[in-house]
Image: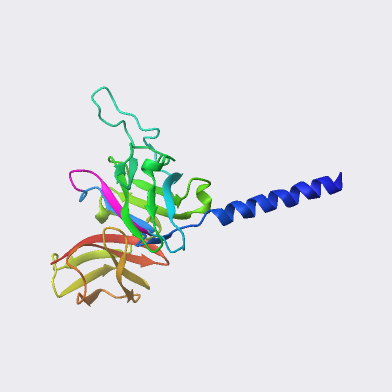
Amino acid sequence: MKHITRFFGILGLFLSLSAQAQFSAPTLSGTTDTVYIDLDTLGAAGVVAVYWDVLNGTEEALDLMVTRTLVDTVSPFNYPFETDENGMPFEGSYERFCWGQSCFNFGTDASPAIPGFFVTLEPGDTTDTFVSDFYPNGVTGTTTLQYCFHQDGPPSLGACHELTFVVTGSVDAVTSPAHAKTGIAQMMPNPASDAVQIRFENARDGVIEFRNLVGQVGRAEKVQAGATLQRLDLDGMADGIWLVSYKVEGVAVSTKRLVIR
């Protein structure tokens, strides 16, 4: 009996390794970990779109599909996606993704495992057709989605990446209760061009971070305890809207919006 059990154990391991050898994974480029969204500045379409590139760095052609997993969601979250009799979405955030020539229905878990929906990448090829569309629909909170790009088979054998959307009602109101008396009192001028002065309230040792609307850090500067006013040059900062966060012990105790032009 022990020999039979050992045989099937070895056979299972062999089959598992064989399956992994048959499925090569692509490489993801331009991925984003976190996207910060302010409902007050969200466009009329109400959607935030995130784009990634997918590269075939292997020596064989890959026929790729996409599987989306809901890792963590706000409440309410419209899934399975439903609409009312007028075609308007029910309460709750919702999402969809695009891959190849198709943007799939809201709430779709995976692109169809059908040749017409695969994106075929020859060795060295790249596709920029993946888009993650997230619709907060007036709901604040954090939602994390995982996308796996893989051949027809287990998604885990492909390339997977998690994407988190952090939605706030007003960036000026993002404040941690534990540090309610510490924060950014004022930024001036705003809009700014060459430099900005930040006035602090009860400053503690921390960091000022500039993030764009997809969550990428463009700059970080130390803040010393007791500081009341700090001037920061904006050389090299791209024009547009930036979220300026004051972090203490790793917690964003205050965030304000800055326009650079």
Counting the numbered discs, the total is 0
User: In the shown orientation, is residue 63 left or right of residue 43?
Assistant: right
Q: On the rendered image, what quadrant is the C terminus found in?
A: bottom left
Q: In this rendered view, identify the residue nearer to me: 129 or 135.
A: 129
Q: Quadrant of residue 70?
A: top left
Left-right relation of 228 to 159: left
Most foreground residue, 65 or 191? 65
Q: Quadrant of residue 61?
A: bottom left
Horizontal and vertical percent position of residue 64: 42, 50
In the image, residue 242 lies at what x, y percent? 23, 63
Q: Position of residue 132 (x, y in %)?
A: 33, 49
Q: Which span of residues is magenta-colored?
A: 43-54
Q: Nearer the viewer, residue 170 or 101?
A: 101
Q: Residue furthest right?
A: 1
Residue 44 shown in magenta: yes
x 35%, y 51%: residue: 165
Q: Provide residue 198's location: percent of width, then percent of height.
A: 22, 70
Q: Residue at x 14, y 75 (%)?
A: 194
Q: Is residue 203 visible?
A: no
Q: Residue at x 35, y 75 (%)?
A: 225
Point out the image quarter for the N terminus: top right
In the shown orientation, is residue 43 left or right of residue 53?
left
Q: Residue at x 80, y 46 (%)?
A: 5
Residue 129 visible: yes
Q: In which image quadrant can residue 117 be found?
A: top left
